[in-house]
Image (tube, rainbow, N blue to C red):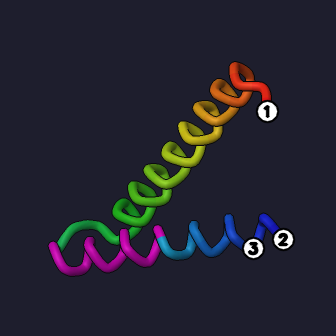
Amino acid sequence: MIWVSVGAAAVGAAAIGGSLALATGHSVPRGILRHVGIAIAAAVAIYFVGAFVGGMVEL
């Protein structure tokens, strides 16, 4: 089920990137790649922060 969420996030980031590229007159593929890359980087950062904090805190 997590892959549905990952796919939806990627499609959403691609839609935002494509829309902004069209609105500003920039390259659509580059805008899509930029926003999907930013979303991936944010997800990785959140994962590692969670793993770090989870390793320090014991519930």
Give the residue furthest to the front: 59
Q: CA distance from mark 3 to mark 2?
A: 5 Å
Is residue 32 a member of the stretch shown in magenta? Answer: no
Q: CA distance from mark 1 to mark 3?
A: 29 Å
User: Which secondary structure, mark 2?
Assistant: loop
Q: CA distance from mark 1 to mark 2?
A: 26 Å
Label 2 is placed on what type of residue?
Met
Write down the quadrant of residue 9 in the picture.
Answer: bottom right
Q: Position of residue 51 (x, y in %)?
A: 70, 31
The range drawn in magenta is: 13-24
Residue at horizontal 75%, vertical 73%? 4
Q: Disc 3 vs disc 2: Cβ atoms closer than 8 Å?
A: yes
User: Which secondary structure, mark 1?
Assistant: loop
Q: 55 or 7, which is in the foreground?
A: 55
Label 3 is placed on what type of residue?
Val
- Residue 40 as seen in the image, left or right of residue 51: left
Is residue 23 a member of the stretch shown in magenta? Answer: yes
> Which labelled disc corresponds to residue 4?
3
Residue at horizontal 62%, vertical 75%? 8
Q: 3 or 36, which is in the foreground?
A: 3
Q: Nearer the viewer, mark 1 or mark 3?
A: 1
Give the residue furthest to the top: 56
Q: Position of residue 56 (x, y in %)?
A: 69, 19
> Which labelled disc corresponds to residue 59?
1
Q: Position of residue 2 (x, y in %)?
A: 78, 65
Q: Position of residue 48 (x, y in %)?
A: 63, 32
SS majority, magenta = helix
Which of pointers 1 and 2 lies earlier in the amino acid sequence?
Answer: 2
Mark 2 — residue? 1
